[in-house]
């Protein structure tokens, strides 16, 4: 299907609210994980939210975030055409230092939603910056996610040492003042690897925020960052209390590393020369009887193994989110 913009994404969140499921928002920084996600989500008849962080844009643009954003978004747009599900792109953790990039993706309609992260600023400054982005995006259909409260840990270029829970009354005021479409809240999760059983998860806060919005007649899907370490039960709980988007990055990174590690350990003797053979990479071992095996060293071989590993994880996570069988065009 053609790449799906913010209007379809809003519809997808409304369906999630009505049917009580959520979307895993899956970070990508290169195409292999994306390929695994597309196949897995299409097989499960789930729409797919992928997200791009400033660090991913920098990586894919060889240091130039603008180039990286256009490249990654272009790959997603083209591949989306080949799959029967809606594919959405969210920008993850962009800040007011990246306004030029935010303007570019809005002007060129490259994404479906944008997260502006000013959660480290004061409430008033957070409102001002988030509102600026909402105004920039007005008329484009692109949804804006803002964050209130602080989440512990390091993610990409943003670091917080302390966690602060989101205040439900402030959440309503914040959305009124900014006009943001989605709200990332802080209820005790951490960015990066954390152990779910050690997290003091305040689902009561999520519930209170959701109830406040409902009382005001506002529809604001809630977002949970730092949800990598959550156990399946905890994911079900937060969805029950109104979380509609859970950010996932670490799982796929681990899935990638693990599958690649296994593959290369298994095939190391087909890639690295045995003792006694001259390590003549430049002449591809032409002076020796031994040759490396193309079946093992072709990047597509490890790529396939990585896709299988990532797919298993993606499949389990989308089952937790409950988005399977819920595609808008399913
Ligand atoms: Zn985050």
Image: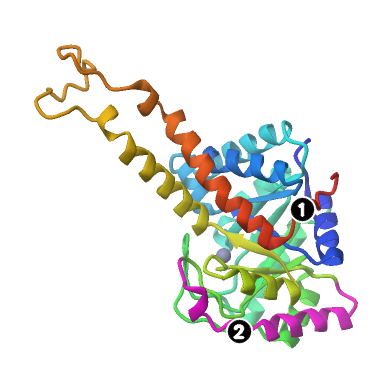
Q: Residue at x 52, y 81 (%)?
A: 163
| Left or right: 86 as drawn, with respect to 29 | right
Q: Residue at x 85, y 61 (%)?
A: 14
Nearest the camera: 38 or 166? 38
Residue 235 position, x and y percent, is 64, 70
Element type at marker 1? Answer: loop
| Left or right: 73 as drawn, with respect to 192 | right
Nearest the camera: 149 or 76? 76
Element type at marker 2? Answer: loop
Residue 188 is drawn in which quadrant?
Answer: bottom right
200 in the magenta segment: yes
Q: Within the displayed image, which quadrant is ligand 1 positioned in?
A: bottom right
Rounded to the nearest whole Å, what is the CA distance between mark 1 and mark 2?
A: 27 Å
Q: Earlier in the sequence, mark 1 or mark 2?
A: 1
Respond yes or no on whether mark 2 lies under 8 Å from ligand 1. Answer: no
Respond yes or no on whether mark 1 lies under 8 Å from ligand 1. Answer: no
Q: Which mark is residue 165?
A: 2
Residue 186 is drawn in which quadrant?
Answer: bottom right
Image quarter in which the C terminus is found: top right
Q: Residues within 10 Å of mark 1 (few under 14, many from 20)?
A: many
Q: Which mark is residue 142?
A: 1
Which portion, as a residue range, is magenta? 193-218
Q: Residue furthest left?
A: 276
Residue 79 is drawn in which quadrant?
Answer: top right
Q: Residue at x 33, y 38 (%)?
A: 266
Image quarter in which the N terminus is found: top right
Residue 63 position, x and y percent, is 44, 43
302 in the magenta segment: no
Q: Residues within 10 Å of mark 2 (few under 14, many from 20)?
A: some
> Which numbered disc, 1 or 2, marks the residue closer to the eye?
2
């Amino acid at each position: 299907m053609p790449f799906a913009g913010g209007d379809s994404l809003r519809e997808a969140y409304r369906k999630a609210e009505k049917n009580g499921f959520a979307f895993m928002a899956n970070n990508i920084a290169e195409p292999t994980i994306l390929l695994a996600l597309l196949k897995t989500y299409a097989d499960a008849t789930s729409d797919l939210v992928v997200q791009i962080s400033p660090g991913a844009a920098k990586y894919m643009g060889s240091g130039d975030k603008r180039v990286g954003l256009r490249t990654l978004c272009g790959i997603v747009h083209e591949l989306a055409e080949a799959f029967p599900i809606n594919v959405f792109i969210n920008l993850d953790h962009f800040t007011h230092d990246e306004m030029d990039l935010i303007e570019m993706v809005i002007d060129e309609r490259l994404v479906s939603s944008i997260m502006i992260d000013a959660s480290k600023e004061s409430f008033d400054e957070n409102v001002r910056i988030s509102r600026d982005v909402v105004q920039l995006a007005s008329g484009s259909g692109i949804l804006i996610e803002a964050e209130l409260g602080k989440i512990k840990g390091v993610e990409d270029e943003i670091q917080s040492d302390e966690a602060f829970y989101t205040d439900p009354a402030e959440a309503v005021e914040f959305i009124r003042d900014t006009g943001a479409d989605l709200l990332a809240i802080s209820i005790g999760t951490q960015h990066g690897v954390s152990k779910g059983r050690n997290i003091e998860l305040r689902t009561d806060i999520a519930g209170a925020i959701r109830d406040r919005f409902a009382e005001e007649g506002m529809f604001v899907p809630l977002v949970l960052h730092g949800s990598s370490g959550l156990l399946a039960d905890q994911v079900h709980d937060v969805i029950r209390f109104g979380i509609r988007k859970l950010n996932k990055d670490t799982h796929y990174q681990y899935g990638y590393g693990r599958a690649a590690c296994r593959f290369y350990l298994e095939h190391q003797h087909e890639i690295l020369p045995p003792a006694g053979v001259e390590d003549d990479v430049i002449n591809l071992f032409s002076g020796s009887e031994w040759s490396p095996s193309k079946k093992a060293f072709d990047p597509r071989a490890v790529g396939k193994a990585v896709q299988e590993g990532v797919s298993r994880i993606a499949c389990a996570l989308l089952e937790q989110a409950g988005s399977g069988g819920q595609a808008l065009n399913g």
